[in-house]
Amino acid sequence: MNIIRVHGGHAIEGDVHVSGAKNSALKLMAATLLAPGTTTLTNVPNISDVHVMGKVLKGLGATIEVADEHTLIIDTSAVDSWEAPYELVAKMRASTAVMGPLLGRFNRAKIAMPGGCNLGARKIDMHILGLEALGVQFDTDHGYIHANAPEGLTGTMVSLEFASVGATENLIMAAVRAQGTTTIDNAAREPEIVDLANMLNEMGAKVSGAGTPVVTVEGVEELHPVVHQVIGDRIEAGTFIVAGALAAGDRGVAVTGFNPQHLGMVLKKLELMGVSYERVNGGVRVWRAEHLRPVDIQTLPFPGFPTDMQAQVMVLSALADGNSIITENIFENRFMFASELVRMGANIRIESHHAIIHGVERLSGAQVVSPDLRGGAALVLAGLVAEGETDVSAIHHINRGYERFVDKLTGLGAQVERASIPDPLED
Ligand code: EPZ
């Protein structure tokens, strides 16, 4: 069994540069389907989710050249299928992001129905309602969603019940090729959506208002391939900023390669907890908080506090001087991480979608299991300050979204290694 082993109690210092954003790169790759020809994406993170999206595109008939570790040259001229198969959608829900582009290109798509995941039901009803308004007819059978727009797509007004990231992205990617204008009200405002809209506009689309609650898309006849750089990963950056707040030495930890404005609410909450940081070129430098204060956090759509930083900040609050409350409003099942942190000595009580965290003096190393991507990374962070050794297993979750996580931590002086131990469940 592959694990990440963390030897706690070592200060970390220096510079770490984050990779491109997973939650943007995946959608940008899907959007290349809209412009037959060769699109080049740079600053693409080398992570397993990107590899899965690559397989989805190849399955549709695209070719992908890996020009270097972070540059993909994607040729979609020969794409002749509109089916995203079960085995890939089951592996990665974000594969459903090809639905909008396929409808934009072929007026049809066949997507395996995405099941739930550790985080919750993860429904796509808002994607479907929005696309139906554009004239798409939906049918489901044998575990597949069949989406068809025999008359083509027609722009209209769509109001989202909740500012869903995925629904906003799929709607934008379909609407760029619709007849007329689409207005998406209560749209998600995440920086990754702005990155997607920027690339689509470089391709010749007419998307305005991305990053605000109202996005307007004027349909166009055709789109052309481009060269586009993926934005830096704000969640990876936030993860390393929390590592610095926990364990930085006197020189601090400089986290670069992202836009600090994409982490506004996180930095505000960290400051309230007593974490000091300064802006540096392309990022921030953070220092260890001598004295952590408790905090109340609600996860909300951007620019609110990102749910993808909830677990990492829970580690900080577990060592704060007092009681913190973290309320998870986005996913119904994102506290599985807490029980693993309790195994390391944290004092946490879960009451429906609230976590009540009573700060403790110290954490102790233990064998823990990653429940999901961000929970896994947060357990490694907890290991940095825990007494003794922490073995984090189920690290395939971490590999999905963190490129060279262990190398980047050891580059800062952390005592962390990848190891292989006998699987306790094996005879
Ligand atoms: C994206 O997921 C991200 N994933 C998630 O990051 C992130 O947590 C989430 O946005 C919120 O910021 C990718 O971009 C690949 P949503 P997405 O549509 O698009 C419910 C990570 O750790 N909902 O905004 O799936 C849904 O079930 C991952 O990197 C419906 O009910 O998020 C969820 O509870 C985890 N019906 C909530 O809304 C719908 O049609 C938010 O979903 C759509 C969503």
Image (cartoon, rainbow, N blue to C red):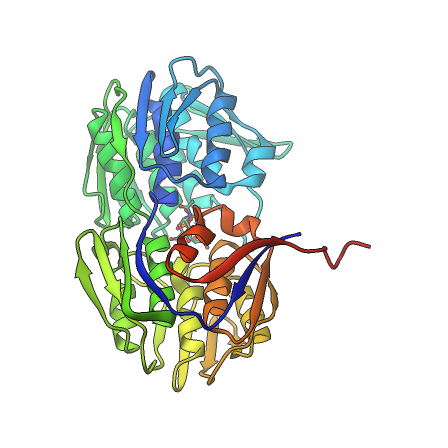
Left or right? Give the position of 351 relative to 419. Answer: left
Instruction: Report how many numbered discs are placed on residues in the image.
Output: 0
From the viewer's side, name the closer residue of 108 and 415. Answer: 415
From the viewer's side, name the closer residue of 320 and 243. Answer: 243
Q: Position of residue 134 (x, y in %)?
A: 35, 32
Q: Who's the residue at 57% across and 40% down the image?
A: 91
Residue furthest out toward the right = 427
**Picture quadrant where residue 218 is located:** top left
Quadrant in which the C terminus appears = bottom right
Q: Position of residue 233 (x, y in %)?
A: 33, 48
From the viewer's side, name the closer residue of 83 and 378. Answer: 378
Name above or below for residue 264 compared with residue 180.
Answer: below
Q: Position of residue 77 (x, y in %)?
A: 38, 14
Can the viewer see residue 306?
no
From the viewer's side, name the closer residue of 161 and 412. Answer: 412
Left or right? Give the position of 200 relative to 316. Answer: left
Can the viewer see residue 19?
yes
**Picture quadrant where residue 311 is located:** bottom left
Q: Position of residue 118 (x, y in %)?
A: 56, 55
Q: Who's the residue at 42% across and 36% down the image?
A: 97
Q: Who's the residue at 36% across and 54% down the image?
A: 235
